[in-house]
Amino acid sequence: MVCAAKSCAEGMGGHSSMAPEKGQLRHEGVAPAEAISKPPPVSKAMQEATNTSTMAAAAAVGAAAAGVAMASPPPQDRAADTRDRDGGEASPLHEEGSIARRGMCILQGGVIGSVTFGVVNLATGGDAQATEDVVDLAHSVYTSSVAVRGILSLEPHRQHIVALPSRLIKDDGAVVRMFCRSIGFFFADVLLILVERCMLGRKPHLWAGRLAHHFIQAFANLTAIFRTETREQTVALRTVLGIAYFAEFSNIFLRLGNIFRRGAASSKTQKPLNALLLLSFFASRMVNFPFAIYAFWRARPVVSTDVLWTVGGVQVAGYLLNLGWFLKIVKIIMKPAVVPSIEC
């Protein structure tokens, strides 16, 4: 997903006040001797304005290096990263007002998920499991397609092996928008479960497992979306989560298997879907997850301690859970059985 290694050292803003040079005074139409002996009021005002502008620019550079958003057009990705590492220009990942836009994007994902669920539920005649399969299939197609786009854009990174390009992981980049919409979708599912469980007295399909999954996913997504204290940590978090989202690819075959099975599909259809589920699960979770975990561990020098251990713990727990699911899939496929029902 990510492009070239884009880590940067924090920029340091500094300034110094210097007397006007002879060329500058001559440009203003003032003789050098006159300017030295008695500077005109106009030249003094310009000097003060220049000093003030220099101080403001230095403060802006220092603030941006600390993670404060700046509304300036980003330079070329690789060049910007080099300047950031050298303590030069500001990071292009953040823009003014981007926190509010990320929040609105999360809300957008929740609204889209809710509307889609309602439309599909009406179309299926209120079949909750069929609706869940169709809606989750749509979510998996969207998120895994963005994840694949990111993986194809990965480039070497000196700290954590690979990194996504700035155009994908900046605050309004395709990968970050996907993180926001995806967690908004899961929040909408949490709301649906709470309404059915607490207000209507129903027990939604696998509701406890879904809540547990959404809690873990919320921590991973919100951390990558909002824990942007430094550019280096932001790149590491968003790169690793973007790679991990490739896991949704296997969910496509899981949901397709459920849909075809519900339609009384023949074994000629079911067996290839089972095989595709097994292969995609192995590639996107059993192989992809360890690589993402290793890349995140390599990024530990640039990630805050609390984020490192908490996110790292969630990653390891997620991998063990995937291992259990994988063994379950293998066991079921060894029999003439249907595709297992797994919440991913």
Image (cartoon, rainbow, N blue to C red):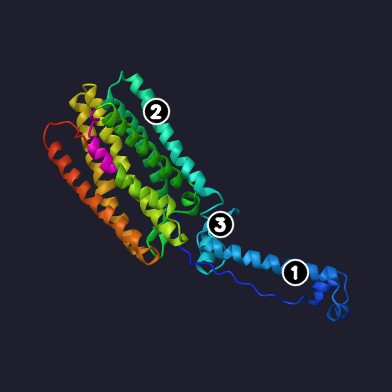
Q: Amino acid at mark 2?
A: Thr
Q: Amino acid at mark 1?
A: Glu
Expressed as whole percent of the image width and height from the top left, the position of residue 37 reads 86, 81
Query: Callout 3 environment at 10 Å: few (<14), some (14 to 19), or many (20+)?
Result: few
Expressed as whole percent of the image width and height from the top left, the position of residue 240 reads 36, 54
Expressed as whole percent of the image width and height from the top left, the position of residue 44 reads 80, 71
| Quadrant assignment, res 16 | bottom right
Q: CA distance from mark 1 to mark 2?
A: 59 Å
Give the answer, above or below, for where 249 lies relative to 223. above
What residue is shown at x 51% (from left), y 44% (from top)?
101
* Residues drawn in magenta: 202-213
Tell whether label 1 touches label 3 (CB within 8 Å).
no
Query: Callout 2 environment at 10 Å: few (<14), some (14 to 19), or many (20+)?
Result: some
Work out whether residue 73 or residue 104 is closer to the camera in this orientation and state it.
104
Expressed as whole percent of the image width and height from the top left, the position of residue 165 reads 47, 54
Q: CA distance from mark 2 to mark 3?
A: 38 Å
Q: CA distance from mark 3 to mark 1?
A: 33 Å
Position of 151 with respect to 28 (left or right) is left
Please tell me whether mark 2 sits on a helix, a strand or a loop.
Answer: helix
Q: Is residue 212 magenta?
A: yes
Position of 17 with respect to 72 (left or right) is right
Tell me the residue that label 2 is attached to: 116
**Mark 1 or mark 2: which is in front?**
1
Q: Is residue 340 magenta?
A: no
Q: Amino acid at mark 3?
A: Gln
What residue is shown at x 32% (from left), y 33% (from top)?
136
- Which numbered disc covers residue 48? 1
Give the answer, above or below, for where 91 lies relative to 257. below
| Quadrant assignment, res 137 | top left
Tell me the residue that label 3 is attached to: 76
